[in-house]
Image (cartoon, rainbow, N blue to C red):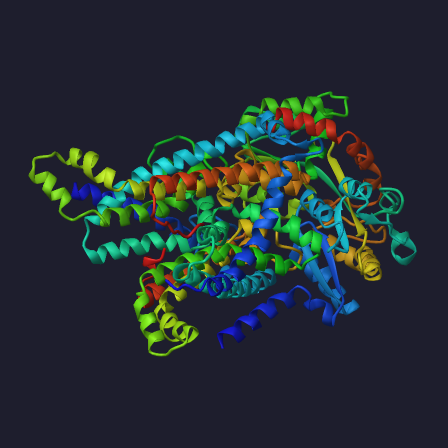
Amino acid sequence: MFEKRSIGLALVLPAALFVALGFLLPVGLLLAESFRTPAGWSLAYFTTFFADPLNQAVFLRTLRLGLTVTAVCLVVGYAAALAITGLGPAARGRFVGVLILPLMISPVARTYAWVVILGRTGLLNVLVLKLGLSDEPLRILFTETAVFLGLVQLFFPLAVLPLLSALENLPADVVPAARVLGASWLRVFWQIILPLTREGLVVGGTLVFVGSLTAYITPAMLGGSKVLMLETLLYQRVSVANDFVSAGVISVILIVMSIATNVLLRRLAAGRRAGGAHA
Amino acid sequence: MRSLGSVLLALVMLFLLGPFVVIVIAGLSSGETLAFPPPGLSLRWVAKVFEVESFRAAFGVSMLLGVGATLVALVLGVPAAYALDRYKVPGGEAVRSIVTAPIIVPGIIVGLALLRFLLVPLGLPVMLGLFLGHTALLIPYAVRIVSASLNNLRVDIEEAAILLGASRAGAFFRIVLPNIRSGIVAAFILGFVTSFNQVPVSLFLSGPGVTTLPIEMLSYMEFNYDPSVAALSALLALLSLAVVVVAERLLGLSRYV
Amino acid sequence: MLVRTILGATAALMLTGTAHAADKPTLTVSVFGISQDVYKRDLYTPFEAKCGCTVVIEAGNASERLAKLEANKANPVVDVTAIADFVALDAAKKGLLQPIDTGKLANFGKLYDIAKDPLGDKMAVGYTFYSTSIVYRTDKVKIASWKDLFQPALKGRVALPNIATTQAPILLSMLDKALGGTTPDYGKAIDAIAANKGDIVTFYARGAQVPQLMEQEEIFAAVVGRFDWPSIRKVQMPIAWATPTEGMGGGMNVLAIVKGSKQVDLAHQFIDYWLSEEVQTKISNALVDSPANKDVKLADDKAQALTYGADTVASLKLIKPADLLDNREKWLAGWNGKVAR
């Protein structure tokens, strides 16, 4: 650690100033505007916003999709991570590659594929009809189910990668030791593996949850105007009606939810820094 | 147990990679419209992608933006990460929070805020707005990844160099920089990919004649119904595949994601 | 080296925003995004050659582009906008447009009368008319009336325009008339759509979505403007354009000059060129827009596909932009309260 504070300050200052002026200031102004009504500072815009049944429905849908996508990603992701750690190093590396690849591909391309798959004449419906699972093609596109599937595919890697590193960091002898002492596999899992990988669950869960709350492309392309989420509602309010009041309110809600989730993450996984490529 | 795991992994692979296979095949369709399975295979829509002028223009904007914003983010981010790691910066944790703040603010809000409180009041050009938004978004990536590399580099090598007469700047350029090079390259690749694929930030910041590629794809899709967007998606997916493979070979990118 | 590269890249970035200004004058035109290949071939490129200027295009639907116009009021980026008549009136009332000097338009006298000054105060000139009706799969359903949109065979198989599109008020007015409504809030139409909203696949934002939905068999019927017909016809399925007993709806699109434009002369030249017999004939023959220029002569098959001829134009029952705008709050409130929730 070097002592000269002035040099240190001079090195951080450009980045800090850039972010402060070119980013924090405008975002701050945008957020502040949502609390400044003609009658003074108040929460009036928020009460008006939540009084509208459409807005309530969109808010609840966003929460519901965020929670279900996170739950599914974590449960399936955990099982997948367990299976991957059981593989040899070469196969493990290949799977990590398979997980990272989608993160690098344009989300527009990733989501567009689902339009082709989920349509009434799409791949999924062709299979459903051939297998006789239904007499009629299913209506999936422009429903919450389509958005759910798209989001799970988009964020699944973000759930698995932290779980994988948590599992790999397990002390090598804990599990065999417990087994030798006669603990059942299930008991080892509940009492040893799960608590020790809590951090991975928290990191992965946060990345997926925040990602789902703030996703734009997936609800826009697979949900349409009947399955609005907060981000698509925000875009619609601005682009269709120049309604910057609702946009500001939605911004505050999104930021509060993102920060709250992130703070929760830090509390639960104190000390460890998490990184991740956000889609 | 074992076989159950294999079945699960096979399903996961199918779920993650299947859509890309579908999009590649749809992009190679010989038909007029987007249909799956396609009536036949051809390269006509791949060729069309290169003919559409708005795709070419948007590709140029996205490349320029990706390279420019990532480079500037690194030029600002590397010294910041170095200072935060090696110096006692007054209010260090607060400063770290500031420079990594853009990562937790949803992109659409960044775009809207820049449009309303910077671009419109000051009358700035569209390109500058995109550049500001993307750079701000990438600074946290640069800081975090470079910080991680610095953490792995022992301070005493640097101190030894200084004891042996190197200036502080000399020690940074001759000792530190070469040692964190792979971290910087990883930060560059991730930053570029993030910028290139970014949609929400660019949504409000695009203007007439200046659009990024993903935004152009979205708007093309809204007015045209042919497989060229699928063909373009497939091309982009292959490009990403190449980047990932090369980066993994060169520096083990998976350590940084 | 690195520093120089970065400086170079940054400088290039800054310049792109203003690069056009250096060499040629630039005219920025805001248009609907449909059929851009035809417009480029028959309008933008020939105009660029004529004027020695660069035409930059902003494409989007009417409400999005109006919102952008409003957001950029202090520093307008668009010079000419091609937009629906009532949206243009909205823009004019918000002080976003400037009057057109019709003396500068050589082709002004050749326009149908209703296209000459549709908004009053010379704020805009009409460049095309269109009808609005229902497209449907003839092998699956029959459509004889606007009320047929809600027949059992179309449950979960019909798409309607989103309220933010220009087609939405036209749909509401025709459906309301069909259901015997008489109030300007289109109450009957909105109630009917609200009662059936679970059976409507989607409220589309762009007409170009309709052929995709048809192709994927998501829908068997949709309400669209005539300008979307050429792309819908390309779908390899038995699809027809309905002529409901209550009549077809319709609308007019207009050209207007944005207040604060720095290219007023060029803007007039561009509008004049767009209204010329030459351009209007080419665009009509591509079945993109029906002509507003009386002198345009079309072959029968083309004429059939368009809204063409003095009699047809005279029979168009367009909704007056002022009426539509005055009552907009009422039907918007009805829609948001009953359909959107």
Q: Is residue A208 left or right of residue B124?
A: left
Residue in view at x 27 percent, y 56 percent: A94
Compared with residue B191, is residue A127 higher up or lower down, i.e. above or below? above
x, y percent for residue C29: 73, 56
Residue in view at x 40 percent, y 71 percent: B172
Return the residue nearer the eye: C53 or C297: C53
Residue in view at x 73 percent, y 72 percent: C23
Compared with residue C6, is residue C316 higher up or lower down, i.e. above or below? above
Instruction: Tell which residue pokes out farthest to the front in this image.
Output: A3
Compared with residue B143, is residue C240 higher up or lower down, i.e. above or below? above
* Image quadrant where residue C202 sits: top right
x, y percent for residue A278: 44, 50
Return the residue nearer the eye: C183 or C214: C183
Return the residue nearer the eye: B146 or A278: B146
- Is any atom of residue A257 visible in this view? yes
Q: Is residue A155 left or right of residue A171?
A: right
Instruction: Tell which residue pokes out farthest to the bottom in this image.
Output: B165
Q: Is residue C68 left or right of residue A120?
A: right
